[in-house]
Image (cartoon, grey):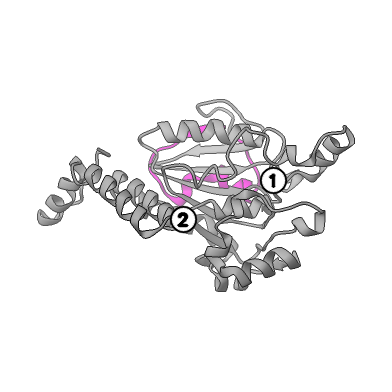
Amino acid sequence: MIARRGEACAAEIPRTLAATGTIPPQRDDGARGRAMPDLLYEKFDHYAVFTMNRPERLNALGGSLRAEQAEALNDFTADVEMRVGIVTGAGRAFSAGMDLKEAAERVSGGQSAAGTAFDGQIMPHPYGSNPKPFIAAINGLAVGGGLETALGCDIRIMSTDAYVGLYEAKRGIIPGPGLHLLPRLIGLSGASQLLLTADRVDPEQALQWGIVTEVVEPDQLMPRAIELAQMIASNAPLSVAATKAQIQHWSTADLANSFRLYQWIADKVFSSEDSKEGPTAFAEKRTPHWVGR
């Protein structure tokens, strides 16, 4: 479902709160766009909420979810008014990762179980590869590919009701390529413990390891995610996109390549209208008017 709303505040997200279990479920299919069975995509004032909506399958990455993510992301990326995305899950899960029931059906049909995980419909990190920043609001269990999805987001916050884990070793499969940054995030020892024990990680441990930056009560998860999104959206869009590109590059590249990327980005950013508007607005003691170019 693609919906468009106006002024951003906590009161403007009834469907998102319903999907995540904060209030009784309700769906407004009269909103602009078409209904998507497995993804609730809502557009607000400069940010959008992507709610994985397969609660009966713990939001496993099967069905039409991947294709719908791709469709929603195409719309989100093309919309210049959209500056930040929030990813969460309906019901009691963020995402259970690979849909093991669909995988079993593929195996019984003589196919590979891996076809369910990476079928070419979308990149392993669809949100991380987007030029705009994403916040993962981890409302419930996030395991396997579900944790990969969260790790692909730029900022991760977590409910006290949630937990994370990488259970692939328990299922006779292997982690996806989306986990290539995990050792850099939590260290080789932490990554080894998480992957080899296939144990669950509670919010306190996730915070200690740096998997998430904040742990909040369930009823504060979406309000806090929205608050962070609004803080980011108030900044210069071009600067935000350039900074995200730098951060991603820093995580994988050497120093020489980082300097080359910086020079290329600096040429773009410092020749923009926004780079002039920021200092001018500061000097004039007014709120800057960003144009994104």
Residue at the farthest left position: 284
- Residue located 10% across and 53% down the image: 284
* Residue 28 x %, y %: 58, 33
Residue 11 in the magenta stretch? The answer is: yes
Q: Quadrant of residue 267?
A: top left
Foreground pick, 252 / 123: 252
Callout count:
2
Type of amino acid under label 2? Thr
Disc 1 packing (10 Å; few <14; some 14–19; many ≥20):
many
- Check residue 124 for magenta coloring: no
Residue underneath mark 1: 59
State which tag comes first along the sequence, 2 or 1. Answer: 1
**Image quadrant containing the C terminus:** top left
In this rendering, the answer to whether 209 lies above or below 84 is below
How many neighbours does mark 2 have within 10 angstroms: few (below 14), some (14-19), or many (20 or more)? Answer: few
Above or below 191: residue 88: above
Foreground residue among 142 and 216: 142
Q: Nearer the viewer, mark 2 or mark 1?
A: 2
Q: Residue at x 75, y 68 (%)?
A: 197
Q: Nearer the viewer, residue 135 or 106?
A: 106
Q: Which residues are magenta?
A: 1-27
> Can you say whether 193 is above or below 250 in the image?
below
**Residue at numbered disc 2:** 252
The quadrant of the rendering that contains the N terminus is: top right
